[in-house]
Amino acid sequence: MVKRNTHLPAISMGSIVSSRMTNVLDTFRLDGKVALVTGSASGLGAAIATALAQAGASVACHGNRRPATETAAAISAAGSKSAAFSADLSSTEGPQHLIAQTIKAFGQIDILVNNAGTILRHAAEDFPLDDWMTVLQVNLTSVFQLSQLAARDMIARNAPGKILNIASLLSFQGGIRVPAYAASKGGVAQLTKALANEWAVKNIQVNAIAPGYFATTNTEALQADETRNRQILERIPAARWGKPSDLAGAAVFLTSSASDYVTGTVFNVDGGWLGR
């Protein structure tokens, strides 16, 4: 005789029908959300800002030495609300200034993308302390400051939120002549996990993307170096450099409700580099 399990929860037909009627593509929509994307004047940041706008978000675009006005104008011309702001993230006052500008213009922050970064190269034994402090401030300390300030706004409104950090292959590898950059990006990966642990209960998901080798203005020298370019391509299973648009899908997923049960992850977008 087979005994029935009387402890299984009842499943109503209404819940089944409801789940069937929910289009999964709708969970990737960002309508009504306000996103702040740092370092979005060009390259990966501009591609992410554009992708979030295409998914329905209003986007605050940030630049410093390179203003983000062109990115914001292109987003506005395509029919989404956008504005450009300037802030120096190498200063401890920069993050507060940027968050204040965004909230004043848009009223809230629902999505924060910490994309801005810098890299300085020296042999480790000669690396100037001032350069070390600059890289750590821009790449790591400002990420914490911006995340803390954005989370305070989300928590005060009892609103769900998404924080997406841009890590790096050097979150996992050491690199050469870039000790400060490697240290900062390793820190970004660990900070992502630490913040995710604390804020998940407040319905704020914190994740990171670790891009591989992407064809941007920051990597023009590597692309132009015939030997180095060949070595890089030989290591990438996809056998090509990434395009900024290759980050679009991952960025939309990790900033939308499609990823509500994903937090504390470092998502590699590298053409297979780390799996080689």
Image: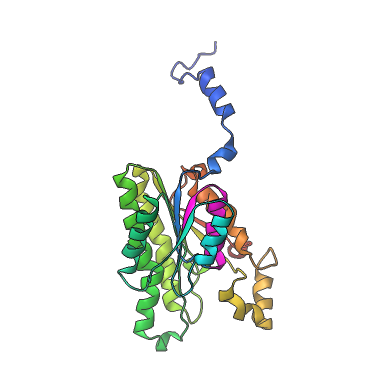
Q: Position of residue 243 (x, y in %)?
A: 63, 64
Q: Magenta segment range?
A: 42-60
Query: In the picture provided, is 149 more to the left or to the right than 270?
Result: left
Assess whether residue 106 is covered by the magenta stretch.
Answer: no
Where residue 57 appears, x then y in whole percent?
A: 50, 49
Q: Nearer the viewer, residue 174 or 207?
A: 207
**Please, which residue is most extreme toward the top here?**
1
Dominant SS in magenta:
helix
Task: Name the quadrant of the N terminus.
Answer: top right
Between 99 and 166, the one lying in front of the other is: 99
Of residue 77 and residue 45, the one placed in the foreground of this image is 77
On screen, residue 59 above or below 123: above
Question: At x 50% / y 20%, what residue is drawn?
Answer: 11
Indicate the quadrant where residue 104 lies: bottom left
Q: Is 189 placed left or right of 79 in the picture?
A: left
Tell me what residue is drawn at x 54 percent, y 58 percent.
48
On-image quarter of the C terminus? bottom right
Residue 237 visible in the shown view: yes
| Along the line of sight, the residue nearer the viewer: 81 or 151 | 81
The answer to whether residue 66 is left or right of residue 23 is left
Residue appearing at x 43%, y 72% in the figure:
64
Q: Position of residue 108 (x, y in %)?
A: 37, 50
Q: Is residue 268 visible?
A: no
Q: Residue at x 68, y 72 (%)?
A: 233
From the top left corner, tell me how far across and down residue 14 is, in percent. Answer: 52, 19
